[in-house]
Amino acid sequence: VIQSPAVGNDLSTGGNSQCKDCAVRKMLEDTASDEYRQARIEFIKQQILKKLRLKQPPNVKIPRSILPTIFAESDVLPENDDDDDDDRKHSGGRRVDDFYGTMKTAVMFPENGTHMCPFTGPYPANCFIFKLSPEVTSSRVSHAELWAFKLPDASLRKHSFVVSELSFDSESNLIRKQVVAFETSANESGWFRFNVTSHLTQWANHRNPFRALEIACETCDANTSSLVGIRDDKKPFIFVRTDPSRQIVTRERRHINCDPSISRCCRESFYVSFDEIGWNSWIVHPAGYSANYCRGSCVHDISTNKYHHTTVLQKVLLSSTQTPTPSLSLCCTPSRLSSISLIYLDSDGTMKQKSLPNMVVEACECA
């Protein structure tokens, strides 16, 4: 939340103590001014980077144009953040981390440019090397899937696919180590998936973040391709869902939205577009979000007070014949904040979904 500088103090350099800094006062009174908007946007940008533990926007290696179309056509990555209530602080408890973003999902793409296997097997196959994000630990993995795209097949038949982990033998040759999963695809082309939760949990326990996987088509003719997409938006990917801690909270009172007729403390809408600030190259979803902020007077209305001391202070201010001083004043400030769910591309080539706490002003009150 951006704290406005005190405009009641004498900012003049001349002898007239009543002279104020008109430019500052005008900007603060006009919350729709471009200067005020840009200041809020810059503050929000810094908050997002800090919560993602980034010093600057990541250097994205994967163009958004080649991301698998499945992300736009289905609910692989949930759009809604169901952990909003976790970000509220109550006397009964507090989140383990109420500032930095909490990872909810991660999507890993193949690291290798060519997907030809270095050996010949009985079935058509392709091999892929994945790098596990260091933020994915075995204790937090709740579910993991390997997604692959079945290319069009003239036979229009179902095919059986087998996923095997590859390892190096004593002579540094890549060989099959174990079968990880198997799945039967549908007749038509499209995405299908393998449950690799157990395998990925074991993978996260090892220090080496790289793993090689083979996807073979057991029902394909030996002289044909594996029918697995390997290029652009049809490349396989590994989807990991984590299980961050949660806590039960109570429901808050409804907020008051600002409109031209309201002068008391209220919540003003404020939308941030990632395209407008030039971040749409690395933020996949959402296109923007409503950050909101609090504004309004806290002197003449006590209907929304939450704390007893706030009501007492307002009565003192109303009964005082002197102008209130900065040492005795009330501010319209956020009383409830919620999180946003951000899906973004990191510089390590991983698409991540994180819940960033305390990013949306949900309600305001005088305090």
Image: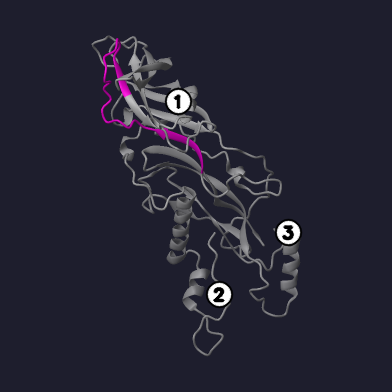
Q: Position of residue 220 (x, y in %)?
A: 30, 11
Instruction: Say which residue label 3 marks.
Output: 307
Residue 289 point in image, percent of width and height:
48, 48
Q: Nearer the viewer, mark 2 or mark 1?
A: 1
Q: Nearer the viewer, residue 184 or 297?
A: 184
Q: Is residue 136 left or right of residue 304?
A: left
> Label 2 sits on what residue type?
Val
> Is 86 in front, or is 290?
86
Q: Measure how far apart labels 3 and 2 are at the Cα level.
A: 26 Å
Q: Which residue is mark 2?
A: 7
Q: Residues within 10 Å of mark 1 (few under 14, many from 20)?
A: some
The residue depicted at 68 percent of the width and 72 percent of the height is 328
The amino acid type, in three-letter code, at marker 1 is Glu
Distance from Cα at disc 2 to Cα at disc 1: 56 Å
Q: In the rendered structure, which disc, 3 or 1, sits on the residue that comes first in sequence?
A: 1
Q: Is residue 350 above or below residue 266?
A: above
**Structural distance between the alpha carbons of marks 3 and 1:** 49 Å
In the displayed image of the protein, which residue is found farthest to the front? Answer: 170
Q: What residue is rendered at 48% in x and 25% in y? A: 202
Query: Is label 2 in a helix, a strand or a loop?
Result: loop
Which quadrant of the figure contains the C terminus?
bottom right
Mark 2 or 1 closer to N-term? 2
The kind of residue on which mark 3 rests is Tyr
Q: Nearer the viewer, mark 3 or mark 1?
A: 1
| Range of magenta residues | 102-127
Question: Label 1, on which residue?
Answer: 145
The residue lying toward the viewer, choosing from 174 and 150, is: 174
Quadrant for the N terminus in the image: bottom right
Q: Residue at x 56, y 62 (%)?
A: 260
